[in-house]
Amino acid sequence: MYLIYMFSDLTGGLIKRRRIQFSWFIFFLFGAFFPVVVGAQEKLGLDVEKWAIELSKKKLNEVNSLGSLIEQLIESDSIRAIQFLDSLERSPKGKGYFFRTFFCMVKAEVIYAKFAGLDKFKDRKAPSLIPIKEQLMHLYADALDAAYQTENENLIAWVNFYSARRVLQFGEVAWAVMYSKNGVDLFEKTNYALEPPVYTELAELLYQVREYDESIIYAKKGIEAWKSLNYEQEYSDPYKIKIRAFSTIGSSFFRKNRYDSAINYLREALQLAVDNSDSVLEAKVLGEIGKVIYAQANYDSAYTLFKSDYRFSLYDSGFNKAANASQWMAKSNLARGNKIAALAEAKEALQLLRLWPNDQYLRDTYYTLNEIYRSLEMYDSAFFYNDLYIALNDSLEKEIATSSLEISKARLLGEESRYRIEKINKEKQKELWIRNGLLAAIVTFSIIVFLIINRGRLKNKMALEKAESEKLLMEQEIQSAEEQIIDFTSHIIEKTNLIERLEEQLNGTIQWSEQQELIAELSKYTILTEDDWFKFKTLFDKIYPAFFQKLKTNVADITVAEQRMAALTRLELSSKQMAAMLGISVDSVHKTRQRLRQRLQLGSDMSLGEYIANI
């Protein structure tokens, strides 16, 4: 349950009016932004001129709140509502940045309720919903720009706060994160007491976009908020929100590989579930603890915890959660050597995900099946699930990378807008000071102008330097997000290895001698760094002792690249395999082989492979 306030006096603060129940992730009625007071004796009706005057004021009284206008427009037919909004926007009596802020937020809510609500579009990715979303995003941007012009931090915070909830319903997670964070930070700046779930849900959003450090900060604020005010009585099950906060912190520490901290916070969540006899939440937290224990290679204990999570998730009809738990059970059994049981549990996860799809859980299940089939030496099935994993993982990772880019972009645009508006307002203040100085006296005016100009230049210089510094930081964040995309290509080498091994199996060329096993192990390597070359060379020497010494005896000035090509030629690898291992093109492989022939002074009638084989 969240506190919803009416703007009674935007210059003096916010007055608590009433509490209503809502969630960030379900339909939110924006009319609560300025709720209508129960028992109001009068309304303005839909009088354009009166509303133009009313919305231009910094103060809204109890009767003429924005909630009243929104309610009336939603109850009216669509044509009349749009005509009213068009007339209101054109009215000469609608003046100032307060009017622009209020008008944009009212129009956005009416358009959403009339044309884009969940009752109109259950599929939030419908093509016909896109132009409506873009119009609303533009209205929220205009409202925020106008709010910045007012320099009223409470108003700016509310516009950010409620814009976040609406854009989140369109799947714009990056913008929702930025709007929410800006709103919460501004409320804290004005010492406005936020309720615990506000912090908790912001922390969950930050975790979703992998901002783990900030997720931990806001989740901890949510926990502390329960202690500062008497919120316990306002919620029917406050312990559930506390469990979410502790679990978010624990999961964030787990993602940061800080396992001790993760366990400590997850135990706090577990204790709350036990104290409140909530078996379902208890099992879910045990599942999160199981992931940490699994990462510490304690597979037996982890399996037991995953199994508990699986059973209670099924009991609670959370088929997607049960699927994830079953997939983790399969990973644990595979680590324990129970390959057949692991296969059955992974297939069970696939069946459950057909009942309740979840792309992240499906991706993890594909990967687990790939690992199981590889351990069973069923390379055709391993190749199949590896292909499915790569395709889905690339899609999900691109979404995360895109979200990171969008967050950086949103942050950069927000900072640029704020600095631009601050600069404009400072210039206005400067003009006012100059005018007042002229009225006083020429001498006083000269002194004041001198001080203002110097002060203004210093402030502008500092503001510009700060803006440039933060802009550089944003660009670095964007570059970091782009570098994440490069990691997608790392799966190509694994895919090539699977293909080669499958071809060998089908052609019946695999021999199971110790030497062939070492050669097969060598073919897994990628020689991209000096460390890779050292490991490869060590293993190669076990198969062909003194090979490199003989090679250097024949050609004293042979290069490292030529030594690598000679070794791969001795292994009788194809040009395609060599290219994959060295991270170069097939054409580059051919060129290096030709240089090696020249170095060895081989004639056209002598095969490079035969020569190398005799060393």
Image (spheres, helix red, strand yellow):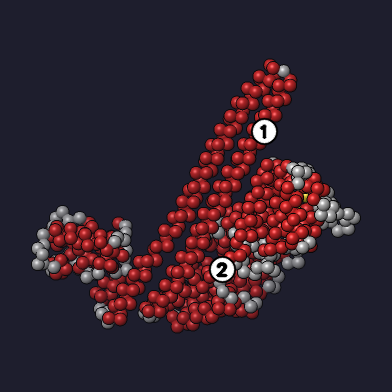
- Front in this rendered view, residue 94 or 462: 94
Image coordinates for residue 360, horizontal then vertical, percent: 53, 69
Amino acid residing under circle 1 = Lys
Instruction: Give the number of the mark in front: 1 or 2.
Output: 1
Q: Residue at x 88, y 54 (%)?
A: 42
State how far apart marks 1 and 2 are (Cα): 57 Å
Label 1: state its secondary structure.
Answer: helix
- Front in this rendered view, residue 105 or 484: 105
> In this rendering, is residue 333 above or below 429?
below
Horizontally, residue 321 falls left or right of residue 190, namely left
The numbered mark at residue 289 is: 2
Residue situated furthest right in the rendering: 41
Quadrant in which residue 170 is drawn: bottom right
Within-10-Å neighbours for mark 1: few <14, some 14–19, many 20+: few
Which residue lies under the disc numbered 1? 428
Res. 227 visible in picture:
no
- Front in this rendered view, residue 191 or 602: 602
The numbered mark at residue 281 is: none
